[in-house]
């Protein structure tokens, strides 16, 4: 644009051909003002104050005892009452703001306030609250920030209290961390000051109303049909199975699906810190630990429940996770007639799992030699299933391993199936292939004796499935 005469800027005047061209004023573009924020801080505070005022009026006028009907009918009646209260307020709200106000008041009354909009999203697998003004979620294996906020620490504490009190637990200065669960089985962990420095923190691991199935695992290339069929035979053949993996790798989801192969005619006892397993069999006894009371007494740990479960005539024992002294009791149960038991363990590899078990058995207070612990492990556990959260967020069963015995002081194990990572795709996801290693497990005769025939061709060394990472 520079050097070009702009119409309307200056009048045209004759000039000498030799005279230099006079500089022409150019209309410079006006600086672009930064985009205005979605809503000013003052407007947000006014909206929150109005919401709190409506909520208090609603509580004063609400008499749930006189309202009849199911949850939807009750919510509809309360919504009409909130709408009438909103009409009485002398405020200028457009239609969208008014609807948002009514919905948020209903969420505060019936649900978990700001979290409701996240809990209705089926794609979200984790909700991570780092104080009242910072909420992250995980979608399809990736973390992302959200616009969800709480008013202040007190508002967030109110929601935490609502969650933990529903399962008979508490979270206060004397008990500043707690495990709980939501109505849909989602696992909740909360930590509050003085342990949480920047305000209350909460993590929600979601287990939705429509949990993942084996068909989903196969379509997501987390496992192959051959691996699924083999694991089904191991469960039905009453082998003891330990699912091994890191945090967020999908251990509990896989454990849920493995339990689906258990016969409906068997009595199953499940033991968990916070009940999240969703077994579909009709004969299930669910046990959950209990924290200590305000005086520090009355704690019931997983170990206590596991010891008691042996007196309950279980056909199967399913422990949500072994993380301490109860590991010794779990191994003893597996070794004393409770075949077909399943549990999970935090470890980064199958070999690390052995070392973790040794450490946790020592936590039981018995000075057992390492060789004795390893012999217990080798005779109790038949199969290790390693799950891993890959680069890019996908979760895969990276190995199915047989514990074959001991050689000297060393536990021997062999991979039956494995995932071989070949690299990272242009989209940032791990790619590779599932393979059968060519090794036949030594317990095939045991599976056959229980009526679980396995096609021997499935163990032929070959590539079972390729995942290109797209």
Image (cartoon, rainbow, N blue to C red):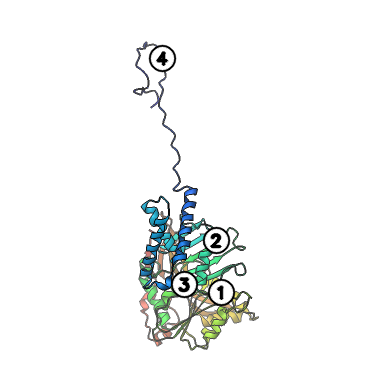
Image coordinates of residue 20 in percent, x first then y, are: 41, 14
Which residue is disc 4 drawn over? 20
Q: CA distance from mark 2 to mark 3?
A: 32 Å
Q: Are marks 4 and 2 in contact (CB under 8 Å)?
A: no
The 10 Å Cα crowd at callout 1, few under 14, some 14 to 19, many 20 or more, is some
Residue 464 tag number: none
Observer-nearest residue: 114 or 18?
114
The N terminus, quarter of image: top left
Helix, strand or loop at label 4? It is: loop
Q: Position of residue 466 (x, y in %)?
A: 37, 64
Element carrying mark 2 = helix
Task: Tell me how far mark 1 sits from mark 2, CA to CA.
Answer: 33 Å
- The residues tagged by marks 1 and 4 sit, at their Cα atoms, a distance apart of 87 Å
**Could you say which is closer to the camera, residue 232 or residue 138?**
138
Mark 4 → mark 3, Cα distance in angstroms = 82 Å
- Where disc 1 sits, the SS reads loop
**In the rendering, which numbered label is found on residue 154?**
2
**What is the C-alpha distance between the residues marked 3 and 1?**
14 Å
- The disc, 4 or 2, on the residue closer to the chain's N-terminal end is 4
Number of marks? 4
Measure how far apart labels 4 and 2 are at the Cα level: 74 Å
Question: Is tag 3's residue or tag 1's residue first in the polypeptide sequence?
Answer: 3
The answer to which of marks 1 and 4 sits earlier in the sequence is 4
Question: Are dots 2 and 3 in contact, CB under 8 Å?
Answer: no
Residue marked by disc 3? 252
Q: At 42% from the left edge and 86% from the top edge, which residue is drawn?
A: 266
Check contact, mark 3 vs mark 1: CB within 8 A: no
Q: Which mark is residue 323?
A: 1
Q: Earlier in the sequence, mark 4 or mark 3?
A: 4
Callout 4 crowding tier (Cα within 10 Å): few <14, some 14–19, many ≥20 = few
165 vs 365, nearest the viewer: 165
């Amino acid at each position: 644009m520079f050097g070009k005469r702009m119409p309307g800027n200056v009048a045209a005047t004759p000039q000498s051909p030799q005279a230099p061209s006079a500089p022409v004023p150019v209309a410079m573009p006006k600086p672009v003002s930064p985009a205005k924020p979605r809503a000013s801080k003052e407007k947000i505070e006014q909206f929150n104050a109005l919401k709190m005022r409506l909520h208090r009026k609603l509580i004063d006028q609400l008499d749930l005892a006189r309202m009849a009907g199911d949850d939807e009918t009750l919510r509809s009646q309360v919504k009409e009452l909130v709408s009438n209260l909103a009409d009485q307020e002398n405020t200028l709200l457009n239609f969208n703001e008014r609807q948002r106000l009514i919905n948020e008041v209903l969420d505060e009354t019936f649900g978990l306030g700001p979290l409701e909009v996240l809990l209705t999203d089926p794609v979200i697998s984790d909700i991570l609250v780092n104080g009242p003004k910072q909420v992250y979620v995980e979608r399809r294996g990736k973390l992302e920030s959200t616009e969800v906020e709480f008013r202040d620490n007190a508002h967030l504490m109110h929601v935490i209290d609502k969650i933990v009190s529903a399962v008979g637990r508490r979270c206060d200065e004397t008990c500043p961390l707690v495990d709980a669960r939501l109505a849909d089985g989602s696992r909740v962990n909360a930590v509050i000051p003085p342990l949480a420095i920047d305000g209350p923190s909460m993590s929600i691991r979601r287990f939705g109303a429509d949990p993942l199935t084996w068909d989903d695992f196969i379509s997501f290339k987390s496992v192959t049909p051959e691996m699924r069929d083999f694991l089904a035979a191991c469960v039905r053949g009453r082998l003891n199975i330990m699912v091994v993996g890191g945090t967020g790798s999908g251990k509990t989801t896989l454990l849920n699906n493995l339990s689906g192969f258990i016969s409906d005619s068997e009595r199953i006892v499940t033991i968990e810190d916070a009940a999240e397993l969703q077994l579909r069999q009709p004969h299930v006894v669910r046990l959950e630990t209990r924290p200590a009371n305000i005086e520090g007494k009355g704690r019931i740990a997983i170990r206590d429940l596991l010891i008691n479960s042996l007196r309950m005539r279980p056909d199967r024992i399913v422990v949500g996770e072994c993380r301490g002294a109860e590991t010794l009791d779990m191994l003893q149960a597996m070794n004393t007639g409770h075949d077909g038991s399943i549990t999970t363990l935090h470890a980064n590899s199958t070999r690390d799992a052995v070392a973790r078990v040794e450490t946790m058995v020592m936590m039981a207070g018995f000075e057992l030699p390492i060789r004795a612990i390893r012999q217990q492990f080798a005779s109790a556990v038949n199969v290790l299933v390693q799950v891993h959260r890959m680069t890019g967020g996908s979760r895969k069963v990276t190995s199915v391993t047989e514990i074959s015995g001991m050689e000297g002081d060393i536990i021997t194990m062999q991979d039956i199936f494995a995932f071989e990572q070949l690299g990272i795709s242009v989209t940032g996801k791990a790619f590779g292939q599932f393979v059968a290693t060519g090794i036949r497990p030594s317990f095939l005769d045991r599976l056959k004796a229980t009526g679980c025939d396995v096609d021997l061709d499935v163990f032929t060394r070959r590539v079972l499935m390729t995942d290109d990472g797209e």
